[in-house]
Image (cartoon, rainbow, N blue to C red):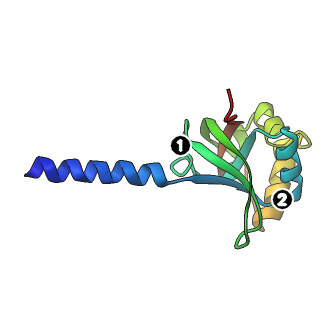
Amino acid sequence: MKIEIAARRVIRLIAQEKRMMMALNFQAAKHKKMLIERTKNCTVRLGDVSAQFPENSIVWVTTGVKGEPKHKLYTAFLDKVRVKTMGTLTSSDLGHQNPEINSREELIEDFERIYRRRILMEDVVTVIYFTEVHEDL
């Protein structure tokens, strides 16, 4: 009897997991343009969001302002998810995040506009590299 209950719980959890879909949403028009042109394949998010976006997950890449309808651009695979500090971001991280940003200081300025607060080199960020999933063979 206990095994049967446990088996039902596992089946229910698997079903819930299959229904869950995550989205990497981008609000800025400049990011939408880069995503459409496929020049952006990385995002840097403030804080540790690695639990919400585990490596090897499938996500929708969407655009849209918070609280408004979103537009799905494509499905992506999360290749690499790393938690770092702003000060340890590499030039590769910056280039894949936004080819127009050349330094951590420029990214900090951008983040301060977005988050409307002071950002420090010691602040934790999550770097998420992703690739588009093609549904044809």
Under mark 1, the amino acid is Pro
Q: Residue at x 89, y 49 (%)?
A: 33
Number of marks drawn: 2
The one nearer the camera, 48 or 67, is: 67
Under mark 2, the amino acid is Ala
In the depicted structure, whether residue 70 falls above or below residue 7: below
Residue 96 image position (x, y, % from top left): 80, 36
Q: Local crowd at mark 2 within 10 Å, few (<14), some, or many (≥20)?
A: few
Identify the element where label 1 is drawn.
Answer: loop
> Most extreme residue toward the bottom, as rendered?
67
Q: Residue at x 76, y 38 (%)?
A: 41
Identify the residue under disc 2.
Answer: 28
Residue 16 image position (x, y, % from top left): 41, 54
The one nearer the camera, 76 or 84, is: 76
In which quadrant will I find the C terminus?
top right
Q: Quadrant of residue 99?
A: top right
Relative horizontal placement of residue 5, taking residue 32 as reference (left or right): left
Identify the residue under disc 1.
Answer: 54
Residue 34 image position (x, y, % from top left): 87, 45
